[in-house]
Image: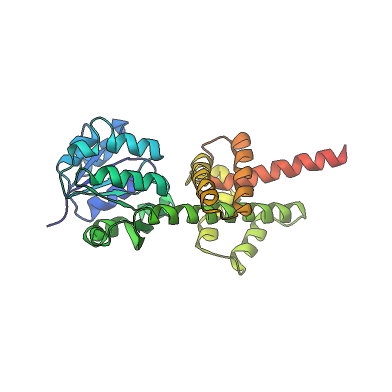
Amino acid sequence: MKSHVAFIGLGRMGTPMARSLLRAGFPLTVFNRTARRAEPLRGAGATVAGSPAEAASGADVVVTMLSDAAAVASVVTGPEGVLEGAREGTVLLEMSTIGPTAARELAAAAAERGVTVLDAPVSGSVELAEKAALTTVVGGDRDAFERVRPVLGAMTAAQLWLGPSGAGATMKLALNMLIAATTEAIAEGLVLCERAGIERERAYDAIASSAVGSRFVDYKRAAFLTPSDESVAFTLELMQKDLTLALALARDLRVPVPGVAAADQMLTVARALQGDDGDLARVADAVRELARRGGEDAAS
């Protein structure tokens, strides 16, 4: 018999992840603060709860996929939160990006109520979420991980257990550091080529075919080449939120990360020029704008 799953947080990533659970045949209860976002899933067979506590009350596994640590704390430990409804033995899969400190604090609070927390954030885009092709990096009790692996497997293509509580949250920050730095490097190389007279599409073809080509380079192609025509996969604001956590962790561990610090600074510029909700690839537009301004200054 399949585990009953409660899914809380139906945003860009959460909704397709919840749909994957339904397709895999898991009994599913969902909750979202903005209730209308849950209605399409009701139509697909999910039960819609009126609170996180209600969602958790009948669940063997609870999944949270939210914007930040404050939202997770509110949903899990706040009034009518998950811990008020969850029974002893429930496993909470915290799949947001909240950092290792918040993950460990959450695990300790949940343990007092007999609930096991696994920090299990995901890496990948909305497109990969729709295909259940994400990767999850997991920290926490190994036995609990093995018990809920079928649930994780319905939403992700790879499930990687990395160590005790906080390990998954740490790995996710490291992965997003790499994504931010890679995005910045692509943007700089692409704009340099454009300014030198190489067509944008030809330059991107060369990048994708070179030694630095990757799945990330491939699936961000349209976002870099025709950003106005593409839907947002990961916002500038959310990436900078994650880098803020990563930079704080690097300071605590005394690890120098100057490349990531530079990418963070460019995110600040991009948000000022493009707005918080632009796709991460809009960093390239920020580089173009700075280059344009630099050229005007040089000509004046």
Q: Position of residue 78 (x, y in %)?
A: 28, 32
Q: Residue furthest left?
A: 1
Looking at the rendering, which quadrant does residue 85 occupy?
top left
Q: Nearest the camera: 16 or 178?
A: 178
Question: Left or right of 127: which side holds 228?
Answer: right
Q: Nearest the camera: 189 or 168?
A: 168
Looking at the rendering, which quadrant does residue 201 occupy?
bottom right
- Quarter containing the N terminus: bottom left
The image shows residue 167, relative to residue 98, as above or below, that is below
Q: Position of residue 192 (x, y in %)?
A: 73, 54
- Can you see residue 203? yes
> For the point 56% across and 42% down, which residue is it?
228
Question: Left or right of 11: which side holds 90?
Answer: left
Count of numbered marks: 0
Colour mapping used in the image: rainbow
Q: Position of residue 248 (x, y in %)?
A: 52, 46
> For the point 70% across and 45% down, which residue is it?
288
> For the point 52% across and 53% down, which residue is it?
253
- Quarter containing the C terminus: top right
- Can you see residue 97? no
Q: Residue furthest bottom?
A: 211
The image shows residue 238, relative to residue 118, as above or below, that is above
Q: Nearest the camera: 256 or 285?
A: 256
Q: Residue furthest right?
A: 300
> For the point 63% across and 59% down, which residue is it?
204
Q: Position of residue 53 (x, y in %)?
A: 20, 36
